[in-house]
Image (cartoon, rainbow, N blue to C red):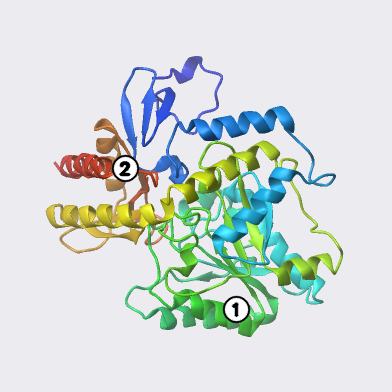
Amino acid sequence: MTDSSSSSVFYRSRKSYPVAVRGEGVYLYDAGGRRYLDGSSGALVANIGHGRAEVADALARQARALPFVHGSQFTSPVLEEYAARLVSFLGLPGFRFWAVSGGSEANESAIKLARQYHVERGEPGRYKVITRLPSYHGASLGALAASGMGARRAIYAPLMNEAAWPKLPRPDPRLSGEADAERLRAVLEEAGPETVAAFMAEPVVGASDAALAPNAGYHARIAEICREYGILFIADEVMSGMGRCGSPLAVRLGGDVTPDLVVLGKGLAAGYAPLAGLAASAEVYGTVMNGSGAFKHGFTYAGHPVSVAAGLAVLDIVEREGLTERARVQGERLLTGLRELKERHPLVLDARGHGLLLGLVLGDPATGEAFGTPGIAERVARAAWERGLITYPGTGAVDGTRGDHLLLGPPLSIADAEVDELLAALDGALGEAVG
């Protein structure tokens, strides 16, 4: 363990951290030789698993040939190839890819692009972005303002213009997808449709409400409503995209839907380098370029050749090894096991998700509701950690404070025996947490 009192590192919290030294497949190893099954792929990042030499070699080749160019001055062969390959993999013909370094940057880019699109169309009064409660779109101020995750937003609220971010209630599993989506109209009308630029949502919710997804038909109706009101539909697929949910894009799990902007991250380079971005429709791209002629936005490391080379190598592996289909198959196996755990552990109120983006909702078995005081998710996560299993706990899904849940998302390359190992460790952790 690290001694924070003698370190020069600014840690994320006061806890002691083990020193990770190696990764291989679904496992991480610390300096003491202890092995951990990475049941959350870090923060659902390590889609292809750890220690893939093929990706490391691609990084080295690109660094030797062309480590950096600035996006205002050059493009690069690797960026051109990757953008073409990526939009093909996603099934988004005619879309253009804007590459940045992380999901927060990518969502900031989408928000600003939606704003500029309407300005270029002669509607400068459109600036609001409707998002959902709960949701999480990133840690930077714009992305955080868009988020509906109370605990992460509270102390920064004075820095945000809350009126610019109207919120739609969380998906309601009791409603049909179409009826659920129709609730967007009321939020639009209250906000003033002529002031709204976009609606942004995670097709399968990640950190804020583990693996919650609306019923089939939701996203198709959302897209129709957005077109009717002249606003853009932004699908935040930072966590759910790139095959993790058993489809290249999770927004298409319930039907053939094409958003105007698709935001990507995490699994793009699968942790081997910082890479995220957005894919913009031909309509959005053309409107901006035929207007002022430039996207009035940028980052120093946007389109970084070494990061893009990592993304290209990861995409090669995803396609060659059929990891999108593997996520679907292994996700079914893991979800079946999670539902069996639900039957044995009454504090598990629900087990849900798509592909290998799965979640457990935890709460009071006597009432079937969230505990009045959060903390059970952290206790389960700690007990799992002691058994060598890494999970992703969270709270606040119900009202910003209450609502414990556990997010699971191992690498898409996980094998049957490793799924079983994950379930066994989680079984023990759930039992210990209420002991």
Quadrant location of the C terminus?
top left
Q: Relative to residue 178, is residue 138 depicted above or below? A: above
Q: Relative to residue 111, is residue 313 depicted above or below? A: above
Q: Relative to residue 131, is residue 372 depicted above or below? A: above
Q: CA distance from mark 1 to mark 2?
A: 38 Å
**Farthest top residue?**
6
Query: What's the mark number on residue 226?
Result: 1
> Of discs 1 and 2, which sits in the foreground?
1
Q: What amino acid does circle 1 point to? A: Cys
Q: Earlier in the sequence, mark 1 or mark 2?
A: 1
Label 2: which residue?
378
Query: What's the mark number on residue 215?
Result: none
Q: Residue at x 56, y 50 (%)?
A: 265
Q: Within the image, what quadrant is residue 289 found in?
A: bottom right
Whether residue 141 is visible here, answered yes or no, is no
Q: What amino acid does circle 2 point to? A: Glu
Mark 2, secondary structure of its residue? helix
Percent position of residue 320, x then y: 47, 48
The one nearer the camera, 398 or 215, is: 215
Quadrant location of the N terminus?
top left
Percent position of residue 259, x then y: 58, 70
Q: Residue at x 24, y 41 (%)?
A: 417
Q: Residue at x 45, y 75 (%)?
A: 255
Percent position of residue 77, x then y: 73, 44
